[in-house]
Amino acid sequence: MGDRKNWTRPVDLLQTPANPNARLLFRGAVRNELDRAYAKHGSQYWSKHEFWGIILEEIDELWDDIKTDADPDMVMKELVQVAAMCLRFAETNPDMIKELNRKRLP
């Protein structure tokens, strides 16, 4: 999760907030990060406490990049990792899966 060497540059495609592809590009980056994380760490269930520790680490890394005015590529990388880990928790936690299945999602 902290490996910055393998980061692709979706920020290059997100230069303006009006970019109509921004959401699609971000979702693709999240999907790629999630696939990479599953390949590296597996897809076992995380407890709520494990999830909290992982997401807190990612948010701390994001906050460090924001505070130090880091390169936009690094900020985007951390945003993608936060989103990917949230999605991973929703996809693998039995309580979250039940909740997702119970609701009609758009």
Image: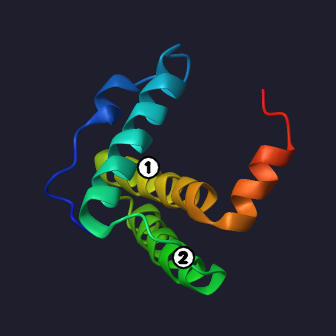
Image height of 99 relative to 67, above or below: above
- Residue 106 appears in which quarter of the rendering? top right
Q: Foreground: 6 or 49?
A: 49
Image height of 101 relative to 62, above or below: above
Percent x, y for residue 36? 28, 52
Q: Which residue is mark 2?
A: 46
The secondary structure type at the circle numbered 2 is: loop
Is 13 placed left or right of 92 in the picture?
left
**How busy is the neighbourhood of tag 2: few (under 14 within 10 Å), some, or many (20 plus)?**
some
Query: Which residue type carries mark 2?
Result: Trp
Percent x, y for residue 79? 47, 52
The secondary structure type at the circle numbered 1 is: helix
Q: Earlier in the sequence, mark 2 or mark 1?
A: 2
As drawn, which residue projects farthest toward the right? 103
Q: Which residue is mark 1?
A: 80
Can residue 71 be seen in the rendering of this structure? no
Can residue 35 be seen in the rendering of this structure? yes
Q: Residue at x 49, y 61 (%)?
A: 85
Query: Which residue type carries mark 1?
Result: Val
